[in-house]
């Protein structure tokens, strides 16, 4: 696994800019309107929902997978030190002919060796396929926030995009999964 200084996307980030302000959906002071709010709050597999909404046209584009320093919000959620090295995977989820969601998953390096899932070998496999098929993995509450544009891949940078994140655990492995809905998704009526 490459350390963060070899990761092209991680190196373009501005660590001083705005941080997300995570809330559970029912406590957010200014949530987005439907249908986006409905997509953010959905408890099931986003992979499955995107596949169905895109007429079975779904695939994962791996952007990077490497060690990176934990961001402030990630460190707090995973109970690790700020800037502690974590395993990070960034992907684009495509459906209906275009990228619809940017997803970032992080996990403490200390938990990777004990994980039943071989995270380093995921490639373009959807993490959701694995998480929602394993009954030993539990999901914590969904939290929502607007997502900092400077954390997005250059082609998809936009202010005001909404994200959700959840903590997944099997007792040893801890994963923080963040999913950012890109401009134009969800389409009306989905």
Image (cartoon, grey):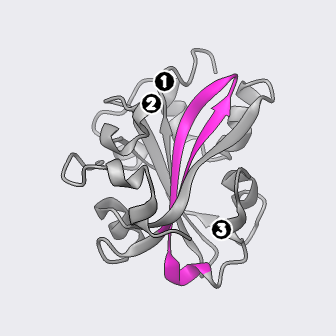
Q: Which mark is residue 120?
A: 3
Residue labelled with disc 1: 34
Q: Earlier in the sequence, mark 3 or mark 2?
A: 3
Q: Which mark is residue 155?
A: 2
Instruction: State the predominant SS element of the stretch in magenta.
Output: strand
Q: Are marks 3 and 1 in contact (CB under 8 Å)?
A: no
Closer to us: mark 3 or mark 1? 3
Q: Earlier in the sequence, mark 3 or mark 1?
A: 1
Q: Earlier in the sequence, mark 2 or mark 1?
A: 1
| Secondary structure type for disc 2 | helix
| Secondary structure type for disc 1 | loop
**Which one is nearer the viewer's eye here, 132 or 123?**
123
Is the residue 21 above or below the residue 181 in the image? below
Residue ID at (39%, 28%): 32
Residue ID at (68%, 33%): 50
Q: Which mark is residue 149?
A: none
Q: In the image, which residues are magenta? A: 87-112
**Which one is nearer the viewer's eye here, 14 or 42?**
14
Q: CA distance from mark 3 to mark 2?
A: 25 Å
Is the residue 105 above or below the residue 58 in the image? below
């Amino acid at each position: 696994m490459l350390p963060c200084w070899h990761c092209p996307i991680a190196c373009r980030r501005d660590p001083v800019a705005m941080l997300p302000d995570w809330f559970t959906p029912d406590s957010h002071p200014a949530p987005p309107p439907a249908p986006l709010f409905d997509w953010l709050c959905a408890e099931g597999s986003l992979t499955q929902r995107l596949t169905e909404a895109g007429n079975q046209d779904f695939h994962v584009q791996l952007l990077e997978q490497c060690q990176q320093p934990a961001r402030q919000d990630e460190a707090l959620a995973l109970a690790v030190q700020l800037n502690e090295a974590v395993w990070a995977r960034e992907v684009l989820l495509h459906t209906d002919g275009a990228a619809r969601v940017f997803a970032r998953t992080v996990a403490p390096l200390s938990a990777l060796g004990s994980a039943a899932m071989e995270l380093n070998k995921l490639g373009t496999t959807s993490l959701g396929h694995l998480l929602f098929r394993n009954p030993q993995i539990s999901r914590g509450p969904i939290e929502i926030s607007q997502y900092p544009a400077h954390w997005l891949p250059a082609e998809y940078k936009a202010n005001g995009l909404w994200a959700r994140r959840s903590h997944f655990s099997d007792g040893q492995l801890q994963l923080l999964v963040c999913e950012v809905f890109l401009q134009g998704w969800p389409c009306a009526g989905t």
